[in-house]
Image: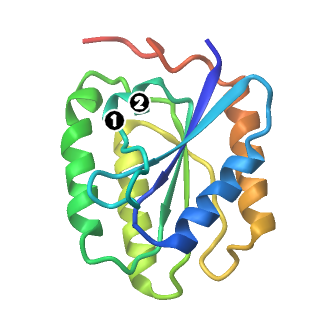
Amino acid sequence: MAARVLVICCEPLPELLRDCRRVLAGVNDPDVSSALRTLPGSGPAGAPTLDPHELAAAGGVVFATGGRTPTLASSVAELLAATAPLWSRRQLEDRIVSGFTTADGPAGEEALSGLLRAACHWGSLLLPGPRAGTVTPEALYALGARMGRLAARAPSPVMTGPQR
């Protein structure tokens, strides 16, 4: 099974969606597939919505926030509630998780920190992403390339941990 990287656009902002596509462009390893997903109720019209079970099959996940949408907190809360059964069965361990925010203020950092804290509770491995204020096309492409390389070399996430 080929490794998979998910880039999750957490807000319906056109510039954020553009930046997510830049990360996807960097995932250029032939042994890694990549996909863009949005959180339920938070993505642009017509964009594929994340099925929480996709996280269990992904080797790498990149969260993207803009920190400017009031509904972000409820979307993140829904994601955490939807992933609770996977987490309790240890099916989200050892994922490589990263993220970035395009916000210059504390709201974007808080949203991203909440998502990365959740990933730590899942048992994920964190890959540093570009800091707020340093999100450039080159930094996003490089993040995708690093994520792709790591996901290609990681053990298959399916059945890696003990099952309860």
Extreme residue toward the bottom, this view: 105
Q: Secondary structure at mark 2?
A: helix
Q: Position of residue 119 (x, y in %)?
A: 41, 46
Crowd rating for badge 1 (residues with CA inside 10 Å; few <14, some 14–19, many 20+): some
Q: Amino acid at mark 1?
A: Asp
Q: Can you identify the residue that label 1 sits on?
A: 51
For the point 42% across and 84% down, which residue is it?
Answer: 106
Taking 28 as reference, is 50 left or right? left
Q: What number is the disc on residue 158?
A: none
Q: Secondary structure at mark 1?
A: loop
From the viewer's side, name the closer residue of 1 and 42: 42
Q: Position of residue 75 (x, y in %)?
A: 25, 58
- Quadrant of residue 149 within the rendered picture: top right
For the point 32% across and 61% down, which residue is it?
Answer: 42
Q: Can you identify the residue that label 2 sits on?
A: 54
State yes or no: discs 1 and 2 in contact (Cβ < 8 Å): yes
Residue 82 seen in the current view = yes
For the C terminus, the image quarter is top left
Q: Position of residue 64 (x, y in %)?
A: 50, 61
For the N terminus, the image quarter is top right
For the point 64% across and 83% down, which residue is it?
Answer: 133
Q: Amino acid at mark 2?
A: Glu
